[in-house]
Amino acid sequence: MSDYFAGIDIGSTMTKVVIMNDGIISSIIGPTGPEQRRLANNVMDSALRQIDLPFDVITYLVATGYGRINVPFADKHVTEISCHAKGVAHLFPRCRTIIDIGGQDSKGITIDDGRPTDFVMNDKCAAGTGRFLEVIADALGIALENLDKTALGSKQPASISSICTVFAKQEVVARLAEGVPLNDLVAGILESLASRISRMVKRLKVANEVVITGGGAKNAGLVKALSDKLGYATLVPPEPLITGAVGAALLGKDIVQKATKNGLPLERKRRLLEEIEIL
């Protein structure tokens, strides 16, 4: 009988679930809502339905992310720093630096052999996060996924001086009214965000390979701007949102294998669906 390992990553804006045995066999991505315990139940159920497996076959389950304590059926709760390191190293064994651009925070992590050696985080201001792009895209009436396409062809990215999201929004609207071309404005926004993130990451000892994860990794313009400012080519996973959940599942696998090898007892939650129902 195969062992199945699950990772749940409840982020501030998105929730991710991955189920693995020899590789990823199921994954779910959805928005994080206010009822996180019910959400954890629902996304886990969806991931299991995707592969037609019952909950009791899961050997070990690790929860991570902003809302990890709200996964009552998890066998263990692990910080997102450790899980991102494990997940990215699995996908890119030569990775030494991770830049994770989430909705409400951005992180820089240096790793060695899949383990974090240092990290920095911006979680106090939206100016260096995906939320910054959401606010600006809304102000300009552009779909978030089209921001990088809009910046194509810019020969002179506009300078955006405001470091606060609220003031930056006012500034870009005013610059647009002054006649600054839209593609130059958007290019300037991506340059500004890349500058803030790269300044944060450079507080670490950045080394190749550099991997970018999180929702921000889906913006090709931002990825290119970051590469230019860091002076390194950057890599992006096929699905940059699930690396934390992948790492959580893999850490669960490590825990089980270590316990089995050393003949140690392994504390696990009983795999009964009624235990995870939220009334």
Image (spheres, rainbow, N blue to C red):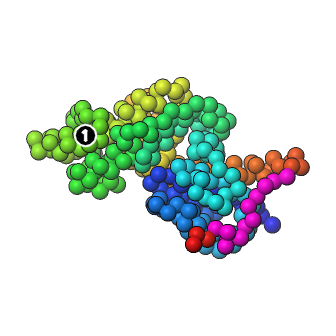
Residue that badge 1 annotates: 168
Residue found farthest to the left: 178
Asked whether the viewer can see residue 218, the reply is yes
- Nearest the viewer among 171 and 124 is 124
Q: Position of residue 30 (x, y in %)?
A: 48, 62
Q: Position of residue 156 (x, y in %)?
A: 22, 35
Instruction: Check residue 118 for magenta coloring.
Output: no
Above or below for 71 versus 211: below
Above or below for 22 versus 157: below
- Nearest the viewer among 12 and 242 is 12
Q: Position of residue 231 (x, y in %)?
A: 44, 28
Residue for point 10% across, 41% down: 178
Q: Position of residue 118 (x, y in %)?
A: 58, 30
Left or right of residue 157, residue 92 in this image: right
Residue for point 81% across, 47% down: 258
Segment tinted magenta in the rendering: 265-276
Residue found farthest to the front: 279
Residue for point 32% across, 40% down: 190
Residue found farthest to the right: 263
Determine the image quadrant of residue 155. top left
Instruction: Check residue 267 for magenta coloring.
Output: yes
Give the amino acid at mark 1: Ala
**Few, some or many C-alpha atoms within 10 Å of disc 1 (few <14, some 14-19, many ≥20)?**
many
Determine the image quadrant of residue 181. top left
Q: Main secondary structure of the magenta part?
A: loop
Asked whether the viewer can see residue 157, the reply is no
Quadrant of the snapshot with the N terminus:
bottom right
Quadrant of the snapshot with the C terminus:
bottom right
Above or below for 52 versus 90: below
Above or below for 49 versus 90: below
Residue for point 64% across, 33% down: 112
Q: Secondary structure at mark 1?
A: helix
